Each structure stands twice: as structure tokens, then as C-alpha cells.
Image: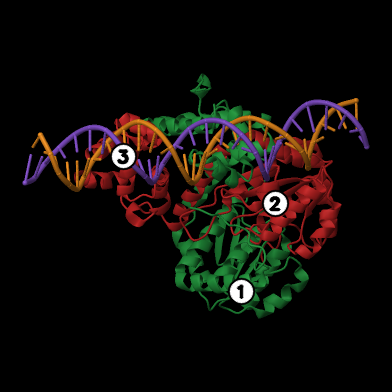
Chain colours: A green, B red, C orange, D purple
Amino acid sequence: MTSDTRAKSLKARITELMDGLTVSERKVSSVLLADYPYGGLVTIQELAKRSRVSAPSITRFIAKLGFAGYQDFQRHLIGELKERELSPIELKLTEAPASGSHFLEDYTRRLIGQMEFMAQNIPPQQFEKVCALVSDPSRDIYILGGRVTDSIALLLSIHLRQIRSRIYHMPANPEVWPEYVLRMRKQDVVILFDLRRYQPNLARLAHIVAKKRQASVIAVTDKWLSPIATHAAHVFPLPVELATAWDTQICLVALVEAMIVRVSEANWSATRKRIESWDAIRFELSDNSQDREEGPDED
Amino acid sequence: MTSDTRAKSLKARITELMDGLTVSERKVSSVLLADYPYGGLVTIQELAKRSRVSAPSITRFIAKLGFAGYQDFQRHLIGELKERELSPIELKLTEAPASGSHFLEDYTRRLIGQMEFMAQNIPPQQFEKVCALVSDPSRDIYILGGRVTDSIALLLSIHLRQIRSRIYHMPANPEVWPEYVLRMRKQDVVILFDLRRYQPNLARLAHIVAKKRQASVIAVTDKWLSPIATHAAHVFPLPVELATAWDTQICLVALVEAMIVRVSEANWSATRKRIESWDAIRFELSDNSQDREEGPDED
DNA sequence: TTACGATTGGAACGAAAATTTCAGATCAAA
DNA sequence: TTTGATCTGAAATTTTCGTTCCAATCGTAA
């Protein structure tokens, strides 16, 4: 029945109950919360499909929440929606009570602080210049990270490879670097990632690259500047400190993703073509002929 | 049909048609417009009662508006509602805020929006539960990402290895997966990353792991849920959409980093010890006897 | 007034949706 | 292992919903 359990936001109630829920029920919650409240405004079977559980599991879940049935639940969602319209501002204020914030929320808040700092302290022209360098198809791009940052270097190279050719992600093992270094030309670009606890061999690499091969080094580092900065044409000193034992790499990711988008937009039609051919080949190589997994089937 | 008549707001269309409508139909319109769009989000008989007409009249009216039926009409209303809600964000996403903000700044702003969404929509208990699983030293942790997310998987495994032992980052090549799968035990944890353009082989892996080895699968995916979610004990549907050609992985990074910090804090003294030994060995292995950590400070 | 087309709603119908049942699977404790 | 409690989804069942059919009604024009 339409009891008074309705008082507080459903969202809050679901979150509260999380512990007592079964695996299936938790899946349903996740889907609901991910697109709240619209995720709940579909038929029970549609929601079941999206959550990858059965309809009965949803019925039970809804019952647990205290509703008389799925349709009762939907009526409630619509009610919330309507109410929200009346007080749009109040909602935002109520939902994020600074006090009872949990770990992830708090951590995210600090990340955001650092990202804002980054956004305001990187000169736009520098960002543009670097993107222009990377966009120039006549330049080869070499990418390398340190022990801990190489995953970001990987992220960058994986995406850039989709956008343009001649992206070289150098292996972590210094033994094979000479092969790459010897191939570098004056117009080429070397993107190096190095955060504190800097790696000496990266610095030596930067030194050689800049001096002997005269390629442009781009250094992505922190505010104390990796030694590679000495040899770099462009330096990005990004904020990495949180009040924790670990430095964050979130700003590297933000910067790298922004670069990816910027570079791909710099010559979108070329990018588009490349992605299409890339996909075509990937499809031929895959075993998709037999098993087709369903992708996101809507909006 | 879900035709293109949808282009303009339904409200406008109803107003337009007013003349050609019958008496009953006009009644329905009035009721709809009086509480738009919520008036239309009730059963056809409820709306009939409110409008003081019969259900068939409404069916006819809806048909006149160009919808395939009442439910089609409702789906449209919900769509409009969702769009409306999204538009303030969409504005933030789409429109580069007129005044002198540059690309990176704008991009960062959008990232922040998604991160805030994530922080508010992941239930704290779920996050805690997963961290507890990963913190438990008696469980082995297997980690694997898809083609594009494996760099994040790498980020996670690199850091977790510093915190605890028995972290296994599975290679991308499915040929060698069996070796890992065979080793998995019931209490072990398998963390899988899979964003849209889901990889069929990951789904198959998840299936086998959950069914045959009965390990706990943790799925990090987007709101459309990778097929691996079917077999997962915990699902994190993270926001990935920006108004660009590329999805963002920033929330994966934020989540992963938060996990790292949380897990390391769960048993800090153990973590600390491990990091120290780790560093000691790393130092012995390095060629630091000759060249100091600092790197070349000039030459 | 009658006649006729347009409009309307009651009732039956068919379709689809939600719920319940039940048997198998899973998990935890003994 | 075995046992018992819990969880899950396929199938059957029930309910609800929307549509169709058609007779009654209305409005208008002759």
C-alpha cells in the first residue's frame, strides 16, 4: 500500500537497504540508480532485461521496498518526478548533505578539486600547441610512461592509434629503447609521463632524445617536475596530491582524454575514416560471425 | 509509429490540432495540458475518468496525434521528461560556455559533472563490500580489462600489487586464460572492466568463472551493462558519456583509485611494511649505486 | 419531424504485463 | 559430505490494460 515509507527519497531508501539485498536485487538497484528515476519507468520485463535478472526478482525487490507492486512503484517514481519539478533547487541541496558523506564521495570531491586546479593552470595555448603537434600526421609519436604511469601512457597510445598512424608505445624495458631512439627524427614527438619517485632511466632517455635526435619532448609530470622536464619542449606540471598515502593520476587521465578528443576533432573526417576501416578489419578478424553479443540497445 | 512527428513538443502539437478535434478529444487535451506531462502518465482509464470521457475516445485521440497507441504515447512523454531534465546538463556538456573558457577547461568541467554523478549514485555499502573483498588477503585477485579498458585494469593491478600479494593481471590473449581460470578458487575475486562495444570473450570468461570456478565477479561497466554483469556479484555502472565522439574513462580511474586508497587503509600497517620491503628490493635491483635517484641534475 | 453522418461509450476481446508457483540451484552451517 | 535455508528464473496464472466493435446518442440539415 501507499504507506508512509514514501516519506524519504526512494534513492535514499534503496541505498539504505543495499545490505539486505540479494545479488539480483542489487543488480536491479544499480540499474535503477544509474538512470534514476527513468530506469524505473519501463515495463518490468524491460527492466529485467536491462538488469539481467528475471522479472520475479524485480517483483520481490519492489515488495521489499514496501510497494504494493511494480505499478505502485512506478506511480511513486512519477510522483517524485513531479515533486522534483516543483523544487528543483531544494533537491540538489538535500541530496548531498556534506556531513554524512561516504568515502567514495569524499575522495571524488578531492579529485575534482585537483582537476579544477589543473584546468585553470594549464595555459590554453600550450595545450593547443601540443595537440597541434600530435595532430600533425607527418610526425611520428613516441609514448612512454614510468612504472606507475605507463598505464596512462597506454591509455593514450591505444586511443591515438585509432585516430592516426605511427603511434609507438615504447616498451618498459630499456634494453630495447635504442631501436626506437635511432628511428626518431627531428620533427617527431616524444610524450613522456613521469611522476615523483622519478625514474632515472626516463631522464636519461629524454636527454638523449632531445640532444641527439632533437625530437620534441613533451613531459607530463607533477609540480616538482621530473628531471625529464629539463629536456622537454613542453611541460605539464599536474596536481597529484591528495591527503592520502597515494598520489592521484586523475589529472593525467583528464589531460590525456582531452588531448584525444582535441586531436580527433582536429581532422575529424580523417579520424572517422580511420576508425571505420579499423572497425571493419577488427570485425573480420573477430569471431563475431558466430556469436553476436548485444550492445547497448538504446539511447 | 514512432515517426518524426516527434520533432516538436507534444504540447505545441496538441494546441495546433485543437480545431480539428471532437468535443471529447478536446476535453482530453485540456486535462493533458493542465498537468503536462504528468497528466498523461496514468492508465488510460484513469485519464478517461479524469477527462470525463471514455477510454476509446482517448485511443482515437492518441491515434490522431500520430502515435501507435497509448503506451507509445506515454513512452514519448517520458522521453520528453528525461530530455528536459538532461537539458541543463546537456547545456553544460554541449555549449562551450561562451566566455573565455578553453577546450581543456570545458572538457574538465564535463568530466567533473560525470564524477559527481558517480559519487552520488554508487551506494557506499557496495563500495565498502567490494573493498573488503579485495582487502581480504586470503582471496586471490584476478584483474582483466577489455581492449580499451585494460589500461585501467593495469593501473589497478600495479597499485594493488604494492599493497598485497597474489594480484594477477590476466593477459589480453584468451589463449592463456585457462591457466588462470583453472587456478581460481571459490573465494577468489575477479575484477572485470568492460565498456560498450563489449567484448564477447570477456562475457564468456565471466560465465565460466562464475559457473565453474564460482569465484566472485566484480563488473565495472557503463549504464547499459556489459553482458558480464549477468554473472557478477557486484556491478558498477559508471557514467561514461560526454557530448563527444569518445566515451570517458575518468570515472573508472576515480573508482579504482578510491579503491586503492581504501584497501591500503584497511590494513595500513601491513601495507606500509610491504611497500618498504618492496622499495628495498627495488633499490637493490636498480643501478642506483652509480646514479642517484635524483636523475641528471644538469650536464 | 425525419434522416443521416458523426460522435460516443459499454462491453467484449485480445494482448501484454505483473505476480505466483514451484523446482532446481546455491550457499552456509553442521 | 549432508541438511536446511535462501535465492533464482521458467512457466503457469492472474490481473490489468488498451483496443475494437457496435449499438445508442447527438447534432444538423432537409
Q: What amino acid is found at the position of numbered circle 2 in the picture?
A: Leu
The residue lying toward the viewer, choosing from B37 and B140, is B37
**Looking at numbered disc 1 in the image, what kind of residue is underneath it?**
Ile
Residue B266 located left or right of residue B17:
right
Decide: few, some or many residues near mark 3? Use Cα within 10 Å; few <14, some 14-19, many ≥20. Answer: some
State how far apart marks 1 and 2 are (Cα).
25 Å
Contact check, label 3 and label 2, Cβ < 8 Å: no
State the image quarter where residue A242 is shown: top right
Examine the image and state in which quarter residue D4 appears.
top right
Quickly name the residue at label 3.
B57
Disc 3: host chain: B
Regarding residue A294, the answer to whether it shows in the image is yes
Identify the secondary structure beneath mark 1.
helix
Q: Quadrant of the C terminus of chain B?
A: bottom right
* Residue assigned mark 1: A281
Query: Which residue is the site of mark 2?
Result: B192
Q: Say whether residue A107 is visible.
A: no
Closer mark to the observer between disc 1 and disc 3: 3
Query: The residue marked by circle 1 belongs to what chain?
Result: A
Q: Nearer the viewer, residue B53 or A173?
A: B53
The residue under label 3 is which amino acid type?
Answer: Ser
Label 3 or label 2, whichever lies nearer to me, is 3
Callout count: 3
Q: Is residue A277 above or below residue A220?
A: below
